[in-house]
Amino acid sequence: MRAIVTGGGTGGHIYPAIAIADKIKEKEPDSEILYIGNYGCIEEEIVPKAGYSLRLVDANSLNRSSIKALFRSGMDILKGISQAKRIMKEFKPEVVIGTGGFVCVPVIIAAHSYGARCYLHEQNAFAGTANKMLESRARRIFLGFRDAAKYFKNEEKLKYVGNPVRRAFYDADRQLARKRLGIAQDDFVIFLFGGSQGSEILNDVGIEILKTVNRHKGMSFIFGTGKRHCNDVKKTAEENGIILGDNIMIKDYIDNMPDYLAASDIVISRSGALSVAETTVCGKASIMVPFAEAAGNHQYYNAKAVADNGGCYLIEEKDLDREDVIRKIMKLYNDRELLDKMSKASLECAPVDTCDMIYSEIRKDER
């Protein structure tokens, strides 16, 4: 199969595209796969590490703040379409799969014009603007949440499959992960991260956890701050007189998420679709704090699906209290039976065979 995958701007769009590409390679090792991303975005760093060739095009959202801004953003999209058309003629794809982000707009438009079979995957319960714009050009739209169906016009194109998660998460092993990360096998491990960009509100919670866990025998804390916030977090810790013990890891970026999740006992995070999928695949109890400004409040509904099954504590931003988070952590630390119950409930919410279903649908359409 000659396939192009595209999606960008955040790990939530990039990693599902990589997971789909990995599945195609697993099923058809001779496949040629190209990733198309956006200039200046994190796919430039992530995709080559995943082993895929990367081409870049210009892409932007339509900026309606002024006529001048609208014109410039429109010109970026047109430029991106022209660049993507050249890539189509050179690469000659049979299939093009978009996983969200505005880079999908020029790529899918160009791919449809070229004659490739086009597919979209929508990760969230609230469908993204780019995917809604591209519906007419897609043969099929794969849904991470059933609730997203109401945002599309053609019901016949929709198929619920869950969210693509890389094989590494399904294969992750707690004991091996702890050995690789240098974490004691018997420690109670807390893992807090705010996504690829980090989260100030979660970092504030992280400082409180630092005060509680630092040098606490039998506990370890992995603190993913995000690159923008790492120095500020370290400075705040210093101002609070916290001298970090060996049981603390402060990371500006989590570049091996399967190991860090596998090594953890409890996860504290936002509830983007990808984070929820990866956390549940690893069967981890969690505290999820939905991003309050997410479109359609979709992060709340992502987390609610897990909370309703008993796999996580859902705390909205307006109700977030650092001392309450500490109480919940210590409750799970002291009640391993409850921790095990939440872990099993989390695993029950994990997506199953998502990439296999996507691959099968793509192959079925060529008959």
Image (tube, rainbow, N blue to C red):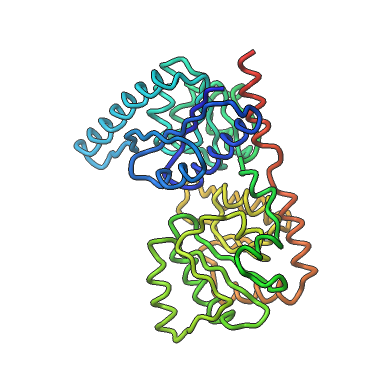
Residue 141 image position (x, y, % from top left): 56, 28
| Tally of numbered discs | 0
Quadrant in which the C terminus is drawn = top right
Query: Looking at this rendering, what residue extends furthest in the bottom direction?
Result: 241
Query: Looking at this rendering, what residue extends furthest in the right direction?
Result: 337
Where 28 sits versus 196, above or below?
above
Residue 284 image position (x, y, % from top left): 68, 59
Q: Residue at x 23, y 35 (%)?
A: 72
Choose between 338 and 239: the one closer to the eye.
239
Q: Residue at x 66, y 50 (%)?
A: 305
Choose between 211 and 83: the one closer to the eye.
83
Where 360 sits versus 306, above or below?
above
Query: Looking at this rendering, what residue extends furthest in the left direction?
Result: 68
Q: In terms of image quadrants, where is residue 289? A: bottom right
Residue 334 in the figure: left or right of residue 9: right
Where 211 sits versus 158, above or below?
below
Residue 56 in the figure: left or right of residue 30: left
Quadrant in which the N terminus is drawn = top right
Residue 166 image position (x, y, % from top left): 61, 44
Q: Residue at x 75, y 50 (%)?
A: 348
Q: In terms of image quadrants, where is residue 165? A: top right
Q: Residue at x 64, y 35 (%)?
A: 355
Choose between 301 and 194: the one closer to the eye.
194
